[in-house]
Amino acid sequence: MSKPVKKLCVLISGNGSNLQAIIDEIAAKRLNAEVCGVISNRPQAYGLERAKAAGIPAVCLDHTQYDDRDTYDKALKLQIDEFGAEGVVLAGFMRILTPEFVNSFSGKLMNIHPSLLPKYKGLNTHQRAIDNGDSEHGVSVHFVTPELDGGPVIIQSRVPVFEDDTPSELAERVQEQERRIYPLVLSWYCDGRLVMRNNKAVLDEHELPESGYASD
Ligand code: GAR
């Protein structure tokens, strides 16, 4: 008998290339999941079109229409619960979440961040890697905890930084890796192999090291 499919809600703010990778991996039957809903905080996010094209319920909760972060996050939680989500996937969702929201989805909330955490938390990660003369850069997938970009890392993927790289060239190289590792991590999660325990990522009952699963 095949395993039950897990319902994932994907949160976006923009292009949605990670969302597309997830949709494609589900279609290719490499990810035992269903995207039960997509939520954007920005009305113009192209990812909303990607969701609609795939027949996925897509909703915009425009943060500018809410009085404060707390009210917004309550509405967000309500919508996620309405979708019946068993996992929440931040895929380019460019908002800081309240600790109440994060704690209510503890162990079920994952994020992809374009740096080798704990390096370059926050914004403009590609520019910062170039400015610092780094020879390598990359991307991390992690469980989300109340500390911004600070939750336990599940996996990282590294890319080289070339001398004449622009931030957008570097971003493109990083995003190619993103589209590989996020669906992989979600397949572990949906197959019940990946959990967060005592603030650590645990895969197949093995606590992952600080830099996550060795992917190189
Ligand atoms: C991705 O590069 C993701 O790592 C980044 O936003 C981009 C979204 O692309 N996320 C963050 O910076 C979160 N702090 P996408 O909309 O095409 O998936």
Image: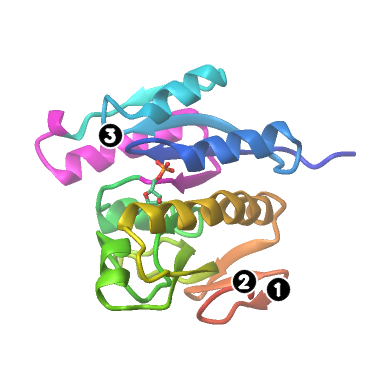
Question: The C terminus lies in which quarter of the figure?
Answer: bottom right
Q: Which residue is mark 1?
A: 205
The residue wearing badge 3 is: 41
Q: From the viewer's perspective, is residue 175 above or below residue 203?
A: above
Task: Find out whether the residues at labels 2 and 1 contact each other: C-beta distance under 8 Å.
Answer: yes
Q: Secondary structure at mark 2?
A: strand
**Mark 2–mark 3 distance (CA, rounded to whole Å):** 31 Å
Residue lying furthest bottom in this view? Answer: 209
SS state under label 1: loop
Pointer 2 or 3: first along the chain: 3
Point out the stretch of residues depicted in magenta.
Answer: 64-92
- 36 vs 104, left or right, is right
Q: Label 2 vs label 1: CA separation?
A: 6 Å
- The residue at the far front in this view is 164
- Residue 163, image x, y percentages: 37, 71
Residue at the far left in the pictured view: 67
